Amino acid sequence: MPALVLLGAQWGDEGKGKATDLLGGSVDYVVRYQGGNNAGHTVVVGDQKYALHLLPSGILTPECTPVIGNGVVVDPSVLFSELNGLNERGVDTSKLLISGNAHIITPYNVTVDKVTERFLGKRKIGTTGRGIGPTYADKINRVGIRIQDLYDESILTQKVEAALEVKNQLLTKLYNRRAIEAGQVVEELLSYADRLKPYVADTVLILNQALEQDKVVLFEGGQGTLLDIDHGTYPFVTSSNPTAGGACTGSGVGPTKISRVIGILKAYTTRVGSGPFPTELLDEDGEALRRIGGERGVTTGRDRRCGWFDAVIARYATRVNGLTDFFLTKLDVLTGWEEIPVCVAYEIDGKRVEELPYSQTDFHHAKPIYENLPGWSEDITKAKSFSDLPKNAQAYVKALEDMSGARISAIGVGPGRDETIEINSFI
């Protein structure tokens, strides 16, 4: 009954798509359990590159059933745009399953997201403006629209009207925008109903039955641990739980069925959007990491902020997720540095701190304490085993493993599907 959780152990963009795709041949179901089209995965298959935003990475593996769980928020227009793009490239998307309990990102959620960020000005959170946060807020406030509501026009109309009662007051009186017509929203949402229907299913039942039949189910988180609404660098976080606990609530599968929790780590650190970032580099090294690593957001198109590896964050991710394994990605990007600094602790108010501070203020003022490790100049993209790596690259991996608190079971040495060294099997 192998149920695996695969998630980001930093601020997202660690290469989860590649890791999920590599496991796809051994996995029966791949489940997105939170987030929406504010997340992005780049998967390289042969000479083909695929940018996935809402769909699970397993959709590229014919033997795998991709699932969008109840914890995800779905923008139907984005969903169909992504499906159309894959279909045009010959990818079979007919096996996709979507939970009827997943919430819909409505046009007014997107509007509220964008105008709120503009209104906040310098205090903005740095959202993607895709309506994710307002949709989760509606869910918690119990005025959300679920996919199953599309199949009862009366209920759908009542829910849209109720949601707009407050939102139109906000839009017209605070933001000086036009009110949104409920009828137009209902009409647009109903236009998706027939095309969505073949995908809609009781995914909670299907996934639990699959596990009872000894099928392999992989739960795929979007974003990363430090963007978790509860355990991240609040308020500069996403609106859901990409940590391992979110896999249970976002899919309806209980925690006793989870057998492995795999964290994805870059060999350095990046983040997109606002918020504290102790190891951020605003110099030539930071620009080199950005250029060599191709560090531009798959969904946002924004340049990622880059910095050296932060072992304090890695230890924190191990703790809050109960990580059993790490998948270390983009080791090849570090080729060419004579020395590679690694953040082993922070200095806060003149004191050395080796664990992530509880206080937001302390983390904001944290200064990295570095240990320099010897670099390497050899090309590692053709390495097939750990022993193929240069000695200094091996030592770097071993040092990160010791500092992070969980074993490194796979290493990405290039962007391609086959450019991975597997040390321990995940299944």
Image (cartoon, grey):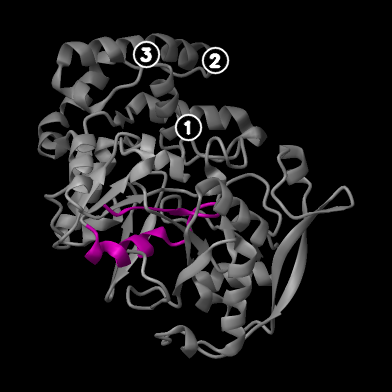
Q: Quadrant of the C terminus?
A: bottom left
Residue drawn at point x = 76 percent, y = 39 percent: 361
**In screen coordinates, is 268 left or right of 146?**
right
Residue 55, can we see it? no
Quarter-of-image position of residue 345: bottom right
x, y percentage for residue 60? 22, 61
Q: Which mark is residue 174?
A: 2
Q: Which residues are magenta?
A: 1-27
x, y percentage for residue 97? 18, 42
Q: Is residue 187 above or below residue 36?
A: above
Q: Which mark is residue 164?
A: 3
Q: Which badge, 3 or 2, is on the more N-terminal residue?
A: 3
Q: Which badge, 3 or 1, is on the more N-terminal residue?
A: 1
Q: Which badge, 2 or 1, is on the more N-terminal residue?
A: 1
Circle 2 packing at 10 Å, graded few (<14), some (14-19), many (20+), is few
Residue drawn at point x = 39 percent, y = 23 percent: 139
